[in-house]
Amino acid sequence: MTVARTTARAAVARRSSGRTGTVRRAPVPWWLPLPAVLGGLFVVVPVLAMVGRVEWGSFLALVTSPASRTALGLSLGTAAAATGVSFVLGYPLAVLFARSRSRWVGVARAVVLLPLVLPPVVGGLALLAAFGRMGVVGAFLDEHGLRIAFTTVAVVMAQTFVAMPFLVSAVEGALRVEGDRYERVAATLGAGPTRTFLTVTTPRVLPGILSGLVLCAARALGEFGATLTFAGSLQGVTRTLPLEVYLQREVDPDTAVALALVLVVVAVLVIGVASVRTRTAS
C-alpha cells in the first residue's frame, strides 16, 4: 500500500509539473551557497575596486588616445587571428585525442596541454628558441629573409601557443561525453570519414567548440608574458593592450586603470555573447 501511494504521488507530481511547465531541480546542500558566494566575491570585489579608481572625468580622453586605440585594435585583431589558428589546429587535435586508442595519445596530450601549466614567460622563451633569429627554425627562415620574432606574427603565435590548449581541452571533453556511437552508425550507413566528421561529429559538439573558442579568445586577449618575451613591445606592431596597461602603470596609473577597465569590458562582452550562442546551440 505504501509503495502504491508513493507511486501515485509521484505520478501526480509529474502531471502537475507538466501542467505548470515547471521542472523540479536537484537539491543542493544547505552549506553550498556560502563558499559559492565567497568565490564570487573574490572575483567581483577586485574588479569593482578597480572601477572605483577610474577617473571618470577623463576616462574617454584616456581610452581614446592614439596609443590606446592602436593597442586595443592590435589586441582584438591578433586575438581573433590566434583564435582562428587555434581552431584550425586545435580542433583536429582534440578529435584525435578523444577518438584515438593509441598508447602514445597520453604523451601527446601532455605535451600539447603543457602551456596550461607553464609560466607564460617560459612559453615565450620556448618560442624564441624555436623561431628567433638564432632558433632552430628561425635561423633557417632568417636565411631566406623571413623574420618572425618581434613582429605582429609573433604576437599571434605567442597568443596561439598559450590559448590553444584551452580549446583542445574543452572540445576533447565534449567529444568524450558525447561518445562515438552516432559516428559508428553513420559509418555503417555508408558515410565516409570526412562526411561523418563534418555532418555528425562537429554539429554534436558545437556547444563544446563554442565554449573552447570563448576560453581561447579570452586567454589570447589577456596574454602578456609570452608576447612580451617573444614579440617585444613595439607600438603599433606588437604592443597589445595588456602590454600598454603595464607600460602605463609605470608612468600614468590613471591611464592604466582606464585601459584595464576597457580590457575587462571587452572580455565580458566576448564571454557574454559566446555564452548566449552556446545556450542557443545546445
Image (spheres, rainbow, N blue to C red):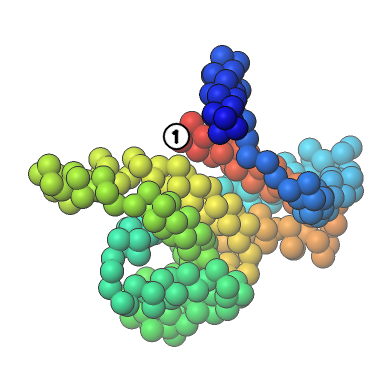
- Residue 142, by quadrant, is bottom left
| Left/right of residue 201 with respect to residue 19 in the rendered view | left
Q: Say if 130 sits above or below 25 in the image.
A: below
Q: Say if 97 sits above or below 62 in the image.
A: below
Residue 244 showing in the rendered view:
yes
* Name of the residue lying farthest toward the front: 1
Q: Nearer the viewer, residue 203 or 244?
A: 203
User: Which quadrant holds the N terminus?
Assistant: top right
Q: Position of residue 252 (x, y in %)?
A: 84, 57
The residue lying at 50 percent from left, 74 percent from top is 114
Q: Which of 44 and 122 is in front in this view?
A: 44
Q: Name the residue under label 1.
A: 281
Q: Position of residue 174 (x, y in %)?
A: 43, 51
- Residue 207, by quadrant, is top left
Q: Where is residue 63 in the image (x, y as percent from the top left)?
A: 74, 44
| Left/right of residue 230 with respect to residue 57 in the rendered view | left
